[in-house]
Amino acid sequence: MSPLTGTVHDRRSERVDADEALRERISVARAELVEAIIAESEDEELMDRSLQGEPIEEASLIADLETAVAPGGLHPVLPVCAATGLGLHELLDGIARGCPAP
């Protein structure tokens, strides 16, 4: 499950539609993640947009994610199944796009 995009993958790593209950859980998790990213990155513009209920595009969140992760205040957790590789693509993408270069 990708909290930024709301997509779910089945065991074969194919995208499938989530049922209503799962969509609600994704929505709550995304809101919490967005709030944490904005709080840790201290981006006032995104904070104002979020408080006004404006949609925040993924590119803005990814940029702020790197800012939030760099000082060590935010530690994103991305689940991965070692046996099937489920979530591996999302993990690697998240590291490449949202974490500072060493």
Image: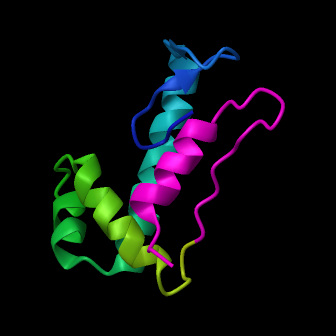
Q: Position of residue 18 (x, y in %)?
A: 52, 16
Residue extending farthest bottom: 71
Q: Is residue 50 left or right of residue 5?
A: left
Q: Is residue 24 left or right of residue 67?
A: right
Task: Please report the bounds of the magenta region as a residue range.
Answer: 75-102
Dominant SS in magenta: loop
Here the colouring is rainbow
Q: Position of residue 38 (x, y in %)?
A: 35, 69
Q: Is residue 94 left or right of residue 84?
A: left
Q: Position of residue 39 (x, y in %)?
A: 39, 75
* Residue 39 visible from this viewpoint: no
Q: Looking at the image, which residue is at 24% across and 58% down?
A: 60
Q: Looking at the image, which residue is at 64% across and 57% down?
A: 77
Q: Looking at the image, which residue is at 55% across and 14% down?
A: 14
- Position of 84 relative to 51 (above/below): above
Towards the viewer: 100 or 54: 100
- Position of 1 relative to 38 (above/below): above
- Position of 6 relative to 80 (above/below): above
Residue 52 position by quadrant: bottom left
The quarter of the image holding the N terminus is top right
* Residue 75 visible from this viewpoint: yes
